[in-house]
Amino acid sequence: MVKKYRLAYPILLIGLLLCVRGTGFAQQAPSLSKGQKVYVPAYSHIYTGNRQIPTFLTVTLSIRNTDISHGIEVVSVDYYNTKGTLLKKYLPSPISLKPLESIRYVVDYDDKAGGAGANFIVEWRSENPINPPIMETIMIGSRSS
């Protein structure tokens, strides 16, 4: 019976080595930037069930300055609907975020104009090359029958 599995052990070992081989290599250094325009997807509603019933969501856009040494300037935060139509400009003028500071913008649960393909375009800049900020949307809602 041992002879039967003699070939299986080396194959299993090779398979395991292939699965974990990437964990030992160094990663490439993150790209530094002095500014970007970033597309951030959002969903003001999603569809559920066989009849595609819309479930409406509250959307929170979070912008986080990840650089520990330098501030950033958020130039614009614009909200677009599924068809690409500008719905709202959140900033009348640029705002500054200190190192590690965050800010949020909320699309209310009652605001159904965005649709399932809504998005934000966020523009930011910095005087120095920095680690780019993290921008993400968090959507939450509930439905009961």
Image: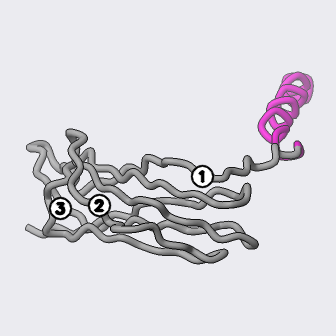
Q: Is 12 positioned to the left or the right of 33 in the image?
A: right
Which of 45/98 is in front?
98
Which amino acid, mark 3? Phe
The structure residue drawn at horizontal position 27% and vertical position 44%, both measured from the top left corner, is 117
Q: CA distance from mark 2 to mark 1?
A: 19 Å
Based on the picture, tell me whether residue 36 belongs to the magenta stretch. Answer: no
Stretch of the chain drawn in magenta:
1-25
Q: Residue 77: x, y in percent? A: 38, 60
Residue 26 percent location from the top left of the image: 88, 45
Circle on res. 56: 3
SS at mark 1 in the image: strand
Quarter holding residue 71: bottom right
Residue at image position (86%, 29%) is 14
Residue 5 painted magenta: yes
Query: Circle 2 sits on which residue?
Result: 89
Q: Judging from the image, what secondary structure is the residue with disc 2 in?
A: strand
Q: Nearest to the eye among marks 3 and 2: give it.
A: 2
- Mark 1 nearby-residue class (10 Å; few <14, some 14–19, many ≥20): many
Q: Is residue 117 above or below residue 61?
A: above
As measured in the structure, the alpha-carbon distance from the residue carrying label 3 to the one carrying label 2 is: 21 Å
Question: For mark 1, what is the residue?
Answer: 35
Decide which of 43, 130 is in the foreground and name it.
Answer: 130
Q: Residue 141 occupies which quadrant of the picture? A: bottom left
> Which circle's residue, 3 or 2, is located before the other in the chain?
3
